[in-house]
Image (tube, grey):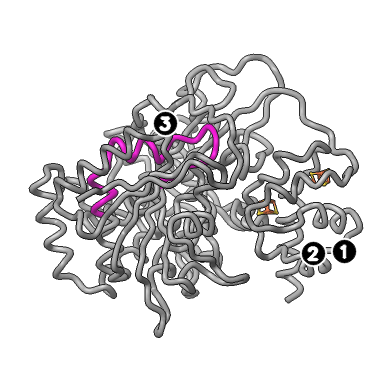
Amino acid sequence: MNIVSRKPRFVSGLKLKENKKSEHSPILLIPPPSRVIIPMQMHTGAECSLLVQRGDSVKTGQLIAESDSFVSANIHSTITGTVKSILKTVSPATSTIISAVEIVSKSAQQQTGDAQDSDAAGALYEDEVVFDNSASIKSVEEFRAFLKKIDSEQAPGLIQKIKAAGIVGLGGAAFPTHVKLSVPEGKKIDTVILNGCECEPYITADHRLMLEQGMEILAGAYIIFKILNPQKVIIAIENNKEDAIKNLADIIKELGIEHIFSISALPSRYPMGAEKTLIKNILKRKVPVGGLPLNVGVVVQNVSTAKAIFDAVAYDKPLIERVITVTGDIEKPLNLMVRIGTLVKDLKDYFGVLKEKPYDIIFGGPMTGFSVANMNFPIVKGNGCVLVKQGEKLVEKNCIRCGKCVSVCPMNLMPLMYGTYAKNNMWEQCSDYYIECCIECGSCAYVCPSAIPLVGYIKTGKAVIARKK
Ligand code: SF4
Ligand code: SF4
């Protein structure tokens, strides 16, 4: 059976300089930091309410915040220590002011002299976890046995484990995974697309995970298969990652799941990894305006999310860490497994000294990321990249009506209109040009010769319109 199918070379989208500087850098597991700042909303949906207060001791993986709302995601402590403070920060998901919790380890407390438990002497740093991290599924036989065990489980129980673990889409959208997997009555999913495209320049976290933890990814995808019961699962990977395509194809054969799983090798074009672009290119289906992939019988999940699902179901492990790429104008671009809430400044030792030029810290890639004011910003669940960019910032000029933004838009929108209306504070008129359909891919801003920050205007426009509804 042929597991890999290849799409034609000529598809729409931008051909960008890839700059995948860290693609050969194995994932480096770094020690837990001595301090984390964990925002109460790292996901699409309702902000969580804190279950702990200042002075409380917490363990790694302990539930520290939750919400009654269905569209939300549990939050867990990512280190072992003490709640030092509750503070305010900017939500990376909504750009609004939200609460965050600062947790410090025992060693950090003792160094700063503010230890609340002086009997805590002994091991200076203990990573006490509340889930079972001694179990380990490693061999092909063990994975086969795991898949058999999954066959005997029911969808509601699996979804409950995913919900408890606070898993969100790790491709950037940070949409709660249990919500995406709870398909409304009357809807039927016939295809799951497992997204390993990672089409944005610089980022290599998913690529490395597909090379190093392919078994875990496929076991997670099998859990999704068990929950949704589709006819097939298609793994989408751009053809600039042939090693990952081969690795996953080999594992599919080893696990004996080729009757369900196949791989679609896609041309490397931006934004190939966007859900609607993937569905159009692989299945020739068009998601209706204002609709979701499930309206055309599809659910798309990212490969890193599948790995987190495996961890949650196999080990009851909450989402406390993720792989990120640290890259750009630095000495050592690499991939790190980091605890959620780690501050960027605490990663500086791993990526080398910055040359003495002005630089920008971008959370996410160059197309969809956003600048953060300083290095005190924490890594959050949906953040797969820290990009350090040097050089002068471009100055915004007037629109010259060149039409380049229109010609590259994968959603066939007219981005120049959003810029025009934004400057005149006429946000509501943006709806006449279907601003809600924008997938915020950044292609329009990338090609704009006038350096108009179209995506920033689009995000603000969407937020203003949503608030008025
Ligand atoms: S308008 Fe939206 S979808 Fe179209 S190119 Fe710009 S960011 Fe992408
Ligand atoms: S690409 Fe920029 S300058 Fe050209 S039409 Fe679009 S917004 Fe105007």
Q: Along the line of sight, which residue is nearer the eye, 407 or 416?
A: 407
Q: Quadrant of residue 363?
A: top right
Cβ–Cβ below 8 Å for labels 1 and 3? Answer: no
Separation (CA) of disc 2 from disc 1: 7 Å
Q: Residues within 10 Å of mark 1 (few under 14, many from 20)?
A: few
Separation (CA) of disc 1 from disc 3: 42 Å
Q: Along the line of sight, which residue is nearer the eye, 224 or 324?
A: 224
- Residue beneath label 3, please? 335
As helix, strand or loop, the secondary structure at mark 2 comes to helix
First along the sequence among labels 1 and 3: 3
Residue span colored magenta: 196-219
Cβ–Cβ below 8 Å for labels 2 and 1? Answer: yes
* Number of disc labels: 3
Q: Residue at horizontal 55%, vertical 53%?
A: 100
Vertical relation: 216 (above or below) 293: above
Vertical relation: 247 (above or below) 461: above
- Residue beneath label 2, please? 430
Q: Quadrant of residue 109?
A: top left
Q: Residue at horizontal 76%, vertical 25%?
A: 392
